[in-house]
Amino acid sequence: MRAHATPRVSMAVPVYNGERYLGEALDSLLAQTYHDFELIICDNASTDGTGEIARSYASMDERVRYVRNERNLGLAGNVKRAFQLSSGEYFRWHAADDVCAPQFLARCVAVLDRHPAVVLAYPRTKLIDADGRVTAAYDDGLHLQAARPSVRFQQLLERVGYVNAQFGLLRAEVLRRTGLLGSYPAADVVFVAQLSLHGTFWEVPSFLFYRRFHPGAASRMDRAQLRVVWDPTSRRRVHLPEWRYLLELGRAIAWAPIGLAEQLRAGRFLARRAIWNRDKLAREVWAAMRQLATAAVSET
């Protein structure tokens, strides 16, 4: 039973055809030692047994709510939908193939309660395979405590890898001031970069999160496959992922409530990154021009 009518924490599981691991993921979330939460399963019009599994958990625990979308909104759209349905002071989303240790919520809630400047609390991560065997301990290195937002922004972009921190516990009020996840590859990096401009990050120094890498995971997909996962409605022929990445980071700086001086500092760093990557950016434009030329010839 919850301590309050409105839960302090909202956890969301956006899922599409996740029957293989969904039960294990939900078991780990319902085994949390911190009990004041709601758990929203947001089904992206799955065609497997996901719905039956989710309904069974919802019937057994009043904290669990099952919502099915009429159509596939893409990963980003499904996360946004789940957040819109949430009511907690704190929020986190959880992939349907990952697992949490029982102390995950309790440790992260304690950090956010104790440190108002922290916008994201996340634990350390171990990587697991398709069968749940630990394959590595992963060092995210995103304990970002610098006072200046531009410094945190730079540190994040220099250190970020698998972006495990996105699965940490966040302040819902801060999330409402961001664009949440975008519908493009690398949107997860842009998302945490936005957060770094709003406040500090805290890494709980315990391994409480287990991220699964398996053949069907998004982390194992190429860019073309990821575009479909993020936004299945996209029909654009030409994609400029590196340019889009820089553009979205620039937008994050422009929208952040950090003052002009800090925006300029963060912008200078982003401009330097663009210069460092100028060859890659040029190749991307050249490849797009060839795609357009080929498409024009084929249509004549």
Image (tube, rainbow, N blue to C red):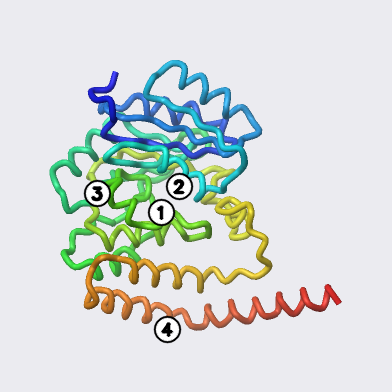
**Image quadrant assignment for residue 237:** bottom right
Q: Secondary structure at mark 3?
A: strand
Q: Looking at the rendered structure, which numbered label has been put on residue 203?
A: 3
Q: Residues within 10 Å of mark 1 (few under 14, many from 20)?
A: many
Question: Hey, what amino acid is under mark 4?
Answer: Ile
Q: Secondary structure at mark 1?
A: loop
Residue 232 lies left or right of residue 75; in this view the side is right
User: Disc 2 residue type?
Assistant: Lys
Amino acid under disc 3:
Glu
Q: Quadrant of residue 39?
A: top left
Residue 297 at x, y = what percent?
A: 82, 78
Say which of marks 3 and 2 sits in front. 2
Distance of mark 2 from mark 1, alpha carbons? 7 Å
Label 1 or label 4, whichever lies nearer to me, is 1
The residue beneath circle 1 is: 180
Q: Earlier in the sequence, mark 2 or mark 4?
A: 2
User: Label 2: which residue?
Assistant: 80
Residue 15 x %, y %: 52, 38
Residue 296 numbered mark, or none = none
Residue at left 23%, top 23%? 3
Q: Secondary structure at mark 2?
A: helix
Q: Tell me the residue at 41%/60% (across/down).
A: 189
Of the two numbered discs 1 and 3 on the same chain, state the one appearing first in sequence: 1
Marks 2/1 in contact by CB < 8 Å: the verdict is: yes
Q: Amino acid at mark 1?
A: Leu
| Residue assigned mark 4 | 275
Give above or below for 149 relative to 105.
below
